[in-house]
Amino acid sequence: MNRTTIIIGAGIAGLLVARRLQAAGENVVVLDKSRGVGGRMATKRVAGAVFDQGAQYFTVRTPELASLAADWAALDLIRDWGGAEHPRYISPAGMTAVPKHLAAGLDLRREHKALAVRRTDSGWTIELEDRPTLAADRLVLTAPAPQSLALLKAGAVSLPDAWAGEIAALDYHPCLALLLLLDGPAAVPAGGIAPEAGPVRWLADNTAKRVSPGPGAALTVHTTAEFAAAHYAKTEVEVFALLEAALEPWLGGSRVVTTALHRWRYSEPRRTCRAPCVWLPELQLGLAGDAFGGPKVEGAVRSGLALAGSLEV
Ligand SMILES: Cc1cc2nc3c(=O)[nH]c(=O)nc-3n(C[C@H](O)[C@H](O)[C@H](O)COP(=O)(O)OP(=O)(O)OC[C@H]3O[C@@H](n4cnc5c(N)ncnc54)[C@H](O)[C@@H]3O)c2cc1C
């Protein structure tokens, strides 16, 4: 019987590893704790409006991603969103569209939250919340690095000295995503805006992106890491009250009719690992994700492809 690889995390990194391994004839199971797919490439529906609440677009600098982007564009999953130096892409159906496409045909188990991963004589066991334990020959962890490390720690697995310190130092900036549905148009540029100062670091209108049906603007507001750290536990009403003055010029005189808040504890890595992925044959354990391949969707893609390359050998 073929060996089985379990991949924890159905973000873009984990899904790319899974697709490559499955195409090479391996048995692959992907586990994700959430109900959706795509991790931080997240799209949320609120009161009939549609919001990209994590990644807003992705930029293409490398030939690997350029080649994937050409395939996705041919399937109408993404469209060009301009870009000064490098092309930027969005998904008209929301940023989860590409991960959903990658997940098709995979054994993907949603709402499967891993609590601990343990070594056995012949591989791994994965202890899950409210579900039977699973077994695998190989294990791939693609959650944000602190969450992957917590799973290893819970299973009393130590990483080799050559990697332990560096991986333990991979931490992330937090971000608060405030979603605002307006009763009319906003005054946000069609390509989104990154204000130079203040608590808001990014604003985009999902209706102008044609992700949300309109007619009212559907704004995604991302705060700076400093603001998120200071106000992480506040409610959406409190966060909106704190940001209202900074947001006022962008609302174009329209009224906010609905708000929602998403807290991203792990938004983007503060620093990245020296290697695009880590494969430890002695443990049959791989680690990937944007903390390895570099920040942003492109770094996560790079990391997933690199790990798939190591595993296929
Ligand atoms: C607010 C915000 C804005 C961003 N903006 C941009 C942008 O404009 N452009 C850009 O390129 N990038 C952007 N990014 C970054 C981009 O989204 C990420 O770099 C990329 O999506 C990371 O992919 P990944 O596969 O490494 O990790 P993730 O997408 O985080 O996937 C990890 C998965 O692991 C799952 N998981 C975690 N723990 C467990 C567990 N115990 N059991 C089971 N499953 C688990 C999670 O549910 C998640 O689905 C943004 C991110 C955020 C949060």
Image (cartoon, grey):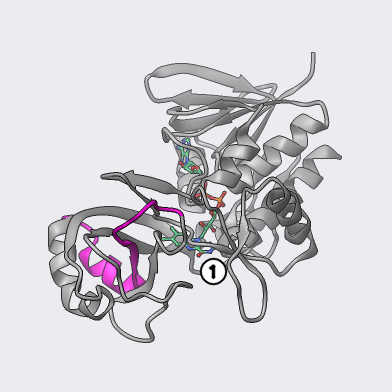
For residue 283, side relative to residue 154 (left or right): right
Q: What residue type is labelled 1?
A: Arg
For residue 114, side relative to residue 176 (left or right): right
* Residue appearing at x 75%, y 55% in the figure: 70
Residue 229 coordinates in the image, percent (x, y): 28, 67
Residue 134 within the magenta-colored segment of the rendering:
no
- Quarter of the image with the N terminus is top right
Comparing 289 with 236, the one in front is: 236
Q: Under tag 1, what secondary structure?
A: loop
User: Where on the picture, by quarter, is residue 244?
Assistant: bottom left
- Quarter of the image with the C terminus is top right
What residue does disc 1 label?
271
Q: Is residue 142 visible?
A: no
Number of numbered discs: 1
Comparing 248 with 305, the one in front is: 248
Give, as a single range, the part of the protein colored magenta.
211-235
Toward the bottom, the furthest residue is: 196
User: Where on the picture, by quarter, is residue 90?
Assistant: bottom right
Where 270 falls versus 288 (above or below)? below
User: Where on the picture, by quarter, is residue 139?
Assistant: top right
Residue 193 coordinates in the image, percent (x, y): 42, 77
* Residue appearing at x 57%, y 27% in the figure: 108
Q: Is residue 305 visible?
A: yes
Residue 137 coordinates in the image, percent (x, y): 69, 25
